[in-house]
Amino acid sequence: MTGAQRSRGTGARWSDDQVDRFLANLLRAGVIAAVVVGTVGGVLYLGSYGFQPADYRHFRGEPAYLRGVSSIVAGALALKSEAVVQLALLLLIATPVARVAFALAAFVLQRDRVYVVITLIVLALLLFSLFGGLPG
Protein backbone atom coordinates (compact mmCIF):
# COMPACT_ATOMS: atom_id res chain seq x y z
CA MET A 1 0.00 0.00 0.00
CA THR A 2 1.46 3.39 -0.95
CA GLY A 3 1.44 6.51 1.18
CA ALA A 4 -1.28 8.03 -0.99
CA GLN A 5 -3.46 4.95 -0.50
CA ARG A 6 -2.84 5.04 3.25
CA SER A 7 -3.84 8.69 3.44
CA ARG A 8 -7.27 8.18 1.82
CA GLY A 9 -10.16 8.02 4.18
CA THR A 10 -8.53 9.71 7.17
CA GLY A 11 -7.65 13.34 7.60
CA ALA A 12 -4.86 12.64 10.10
CA ARG A 13 -2.50 10.72 7.80
CA TRP A 14 -0.18 12.38 5.34
CA SER A 15 0.82 11.05 1.95
CA ASP A 16 4.49 10.56 1.13
CA ASP A 17 4.32 13.50 -1.30
CA GLN A 18 2.83 15.77 1.37
CA VAL A 19 5.56 14.79 3.82
CA ASP A 20 8.28 15.35 1.22
CA ARG A 21 6.94 18.79 0.31
CA PHE A 22 6.55 19.81 3.94
CA LEU A 23 10.06 18.70 4.88
CA ALA A 24 11.58 20.39 1.81
CA ASN A 25 9.80 23.63 2.70
CA LEU A 26 10.93 23.31 6.31
CA LEU A 27 14.57 22.92 5.27
CA ARG A 28 14.28 25.78 2.79
CA ALA A 29 12.69 28.10 5.35
CA GLY A 30 15.28 27.22 8.00
CA VAL A 31 18.22 27.89 5.72
CA ILE A 32 16.71 31.12 4.38
CA ALA A 33 16.01 32.33 7.94
CA ALA A 34 19.58 31.50 8.98
CA VAL A 35 21.00 33.35 5.97
CA VAL A 36 18.86 36.45 6.58
CA VAL A 37 19.68 36.54 10.31
CA GLY A 38 23.36 35.86 9.60
CA THR A 39 23.51 38.63 7.02
CA VAL A 40 21.93 41.10 9.44
CA GLY A 41 24.36 39.97 12.14
CA GLY A 42 27.31 40.29 9.79
CA VAL A 43 26.33 43.81 8.77
CA LEU A 44 25.86 44.79 12.43
CA TYR A 45 29.19 43.21 13.34
CA LEU A 46 31.07 44.98 10.55
CA GLY A 47 29.41 48.24 11.54
CA SER A 48 30.57 47.81 15.12
CA TYR A 49 33.99 46.16 14.72
CA GLY A 50 34.88 46.45 11.04
CA PHE A 51 37.69 48.95 11.49
CA GLN A 52 39.32 47.37 14.54
CA PRO A 53 42.60 45.57 13.86
CA ALA A 54 42.55 41.82 14.44
CA ASP A 55 44.63 40.49 17.32
CA TYR A 56 45.80 37.01 16.39
CA ARG A 57 48.25 36.71 19.29
CA HIS A 58 45.63 36.04 21.92
CA PHE A 59 42.71 33.67 21.70
CA ARG A 60 39.56 34.94 23.29
CA GLY A 61 36.68 32.48 23.48
CA GLU A 62 33.05 33.40 23.25
CA PRO A 63 31.66 35.52 26.07
CA ALA A 64 29.48 33.67 28.57
CA TYR A 65 26.29 35.28 27.25
CA LEU A 66 26.83 33.57 23.87
CA ARG A 67 26.83 30.07 25.37
CA GLY A 68 23.15 29.64 26.20
CA VAL A 69 20.13 29.70 23.93
CA SER A 70 18.08 32.11 26.07
CA SER A 71 20.93 34.59 26.43
CA ILE A 72 21.69 34.38 22.68
CA VAL A 73 18.05 35.16 21.86
CA ALA A 74 18.01 38.01 24.40
CA GLY A 75 21.23 39.42 22.96
CA ALA A 76 19.90 39.12 19.41
CA LEU A 77 16.71 40.94 20.39
CA ALA A 78 18.93 43.68 21.82
CA LEU A 79 20.70 43.73 18.40
CA LYS A 80 24.08 42.72 19.80
CA SER A 81 25.90 41.75 16.64
CA GLU A 82 27.69 38.70 18.06
CA ALA A 83 24.42 37.33 19.41
CA VAL A 84 22.67 37.85 16.08
CA VAL A 85 25.40 35.87 14.28
CA GLN A 86 25.21 33.18 16.96
CA LEU A 87 21.43 33.02 16.54
CA ALA A 88 21.94 32.42 12.81
CA LEU A 89 24.18 29.48 13.65
CA LEU A 90 21.57 28.12 16.06
CA LEU A 91 18.92 28.37 13.34
CA LEU A 92 21.19 26.55 10.92
CA ILE A 93 21.82 23.75 13.44
CA ALA A 94 18.16 23.55 14.45
CA THR A 95 16.92 23.16 10.87
CA PRO A 96 17.94 19.52 10.29
CA VAL A 97 16.95 18.62 13.86
CA ALA A 98 13.49 20.06 13.22
CA ARG A 99 13.37 18.10 9.97
CA VAL A 100 13.98 14.85 11.82
CA ALA A 101 11.42 15.76 14.50
CA PHE A 102 8.74 16.57 11.93
CA ALA A 103 9.59 13.44 9.96
CA LEU A 104 9.01 11.50 13.17
CA ALA A 105 5.60 13.13 13.56
CA ALA A 106 4.73 12.29 9.95
CA PHE A 107 5.77 8.66 10.38
CA VAL A 108 3.65 8.44 13.54
CA LEU A 109 0.66 9.83 11.62
CA GLN A 110 1.34 7.38 8.80
CA ARG A 111 1.62 4.59 11.40
CA ASP A 112 4.89 3.44 9.86
CA ARG A 113 6.44 1.71 12.87
CA VAL A 114 9.77 0.84 11.25
CA TYR A 115 10.47 4.44 10.27
CA VAL A 116 9.23 5.69 13.65
CA VAL A 117 11.84 3.55 15.39
CA ILE A 118 14.62 4.52 12.96
CA THR A 119 13.75 8.21 13.20
CA LEU A 120 13.59 8.03 17.00
CA ILE A 121 17.11 6.59 17.03
CA VAL A 122 18.38 9.31 14.69
CA LEU A 123 16.69 12.05 16.75
CA ALA A 124 18.08 10.63 19.99
CA LEU A 125 21.60 10.56 18.53
CA LEU A 126 21.27 14.13 17.26
CA LEU A 127 20.04 15.43 20.60
CA PHE A 128 22.66 13.41 22.49
CA SER A 129 25.44 14.93 20.42
CA LEU A 130 24.00 18.46 20.61
CA PHE A 131 23.67 18.45 24.37
CA GLY A 132 27.19 17.37 25.11
CA GLY A 133 27.27 13.61 24.79
CA LEU A 134 28.89 11.64 27.58
CA PRO A 135 30.55 13.56 30.40
CA GLY A 136 34.26 13.22 30.12
Image (spheres, helix red, strand yellow):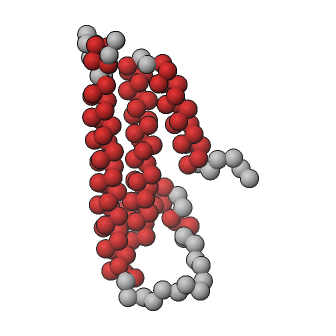
Q: Total marks drawn?
A: 0
The quarter of the rendered structure image containing the N terminus is top left
The residue under the point 59% across, 79% down is 59
Q: Which x, y percent locates residue 109?
A: 38, 21
The residue under the point 37% across, 83% down is 50
Q: Which x, y percent locates residue 115?
A: 47, 24
Residue 88: which quarter of the image?
bottom left
Residue 37: which quarter of the image?
bottom left
Kindly tell me whether residue 6 is visible in this rendering: yes
Q: Residue furthest right?
A: 136
Kindly tell me whether residue 7 is visible in this rendering: no
The vertical placement of 50 against 29, above or below, is below
The vertical placement of 13 against 57, above or below, is above
Q: Which x, y percent locates residue 53?
A: 45, 89
* In-image side of 33 versus 127 (left or right): left
The one nearer the camera, 15 or 42, is 15
The residue under the point 48% across, 60% down is 71
The residue under the point 29% across, 47% down is 28
The vertical placement of 26 against 65, above or below, is above
Q: Which x, y percent locates residue 3?
A: 32, 19
The vertical placement of 117 against 26, above or below, is above
* In-image side of 35 versus 57 (left or right): left
